[in-house]
Amino acid sequence: MASSPRIGSPHRSSYRDRDRRSWHYSRSAKSPDSSSRSPIRPRISELPLHVSNGDINAFLSLLGDVLRLPEETISMTHIYLNRYLRWHRTTTTSSSPPAAQPTSLNTNSPTNSPPLLDQHTLALASLSLSTKSTECPRRLRDILLPAYHILHPPPHNPPLTYPSHKYDALRHTIVQAELILLRALAFGIHQSPVAYEYLPRLVSKILNSKVYGGGLYSPTVGGMEDWDTYTPGEAEECGVVEIMQTGLAKRAKFWVGRASQEYLLVNFYTMRTVAVASVWLGMKDVGWGILGDSCEEDGAREREGKLSQGIREWVEQITSGRVDPEEFWEVLEILEGSWKGESQVVVP
């Protein structure tokens, strides 16, 4: 009589053992550690957004949002960038040698014009400097890594890593560009105010509680609350927003941001004039106008591209005569032209 095979015999195995081995092998083939697995493709939502290489405004806007920077910082970035362009143009013009005495570009003569920085290098150096001047500091690593991914998106380009030789080289380039930018700004990153600083007072004048509450015309009659006098605690309790959180202020801040991208406005007009023009355009965006004795005539002159008497008086009163109405009108035309794609940017 033949003896039954022992459990664990090398010659025969049970169906349960074979099922276990086949299950184990199938799990091993799909293991994450397997070298034969195909690379994981990132989802579309996980890829960096695409911007045109020549659109510096879109590049800085996206990078600023990734870095969670306030719009004041981005506007200051554009201001630095445009002032550098003017400095380079002025330096190039003043240092050009006479035609009768040509100078070699390889010499160290002080008459040589400085080379123009690459647009992305200039943008990143301006952004790095503006984060410091607006007290929103960001490390160069935090700026360079997302900037490189925006300009060289995966999966077709290898990502920039830290630490690496490529990162060290890019960081050195930006640091040197910052030094050149500081020279162009004469080391005065806080010299002149930006248009944002004028907005709270201008908007507060326009949205004056005494005007709409009747207190300005009838002081003896009880008017509405003066919301600007509320303490932060009272404002929070009653749900009173700050003046810069109103709809008009938000629209004006948008136009100030647009103005900072314009070479002419940054270099040849006062920031107070830019702020007043931005407030005016913000009023137009929401359908507001000034109330005067000849509103129809003022509207007709404005449609014809002419400065009406009502607008002239409004500018003089809202700024206490500190802004020239003619310059205000010129700023309006430049801003509206840039919005319609007729930007008058001057590139050296």
Image (cartoon, helix red, strand yellow):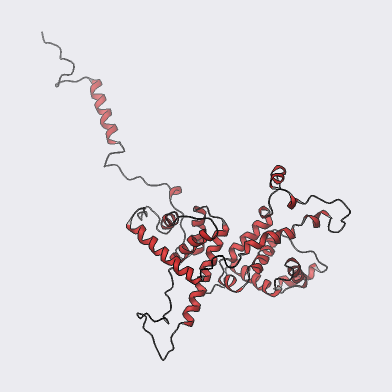
Q: How many numbered discs?
A: 0
Is residue 130 found left or right of 318 in the rendered image?
Answer: left
Instruction: Return the x and y of residue 99 as percentages of the image width and height.
Output: 43, 89
Residue ID at (43%, 67%): 177
Residue at the extreme right: 220
Q: Is residue 200 left or right of residue 150?
A: right
Position of the N terminus, as image quadrant, is top left
Query: Quarter of the image holding residue 157?
Result: bottom left
Residue found at the far top of this picture: 1
Compared across the picture, whether 45 is left or right of 299 comes to left
- Residue 342 seen in the figure: no
Q: In which quarter of the image is residue 13?
A: top left
Residue 307 against residue 230 in the figure, above or below: below
Q: Give residue 70's position: percent from left, percent from top.
A: 56, 55
Residue situated furthest left in the rendering: 1
25 and 293: which is toward the camera: 293
Residue closer to the observer: 1 or 228:
228
Residue 195: image location, x then y, percent? 62, 64
Q: Where is residue 46 in the image (x, y as percent from the top left)?
A: 44, 48
Q: In the image as oriented, which residue stretches furthest toward the bottom?
A: 100
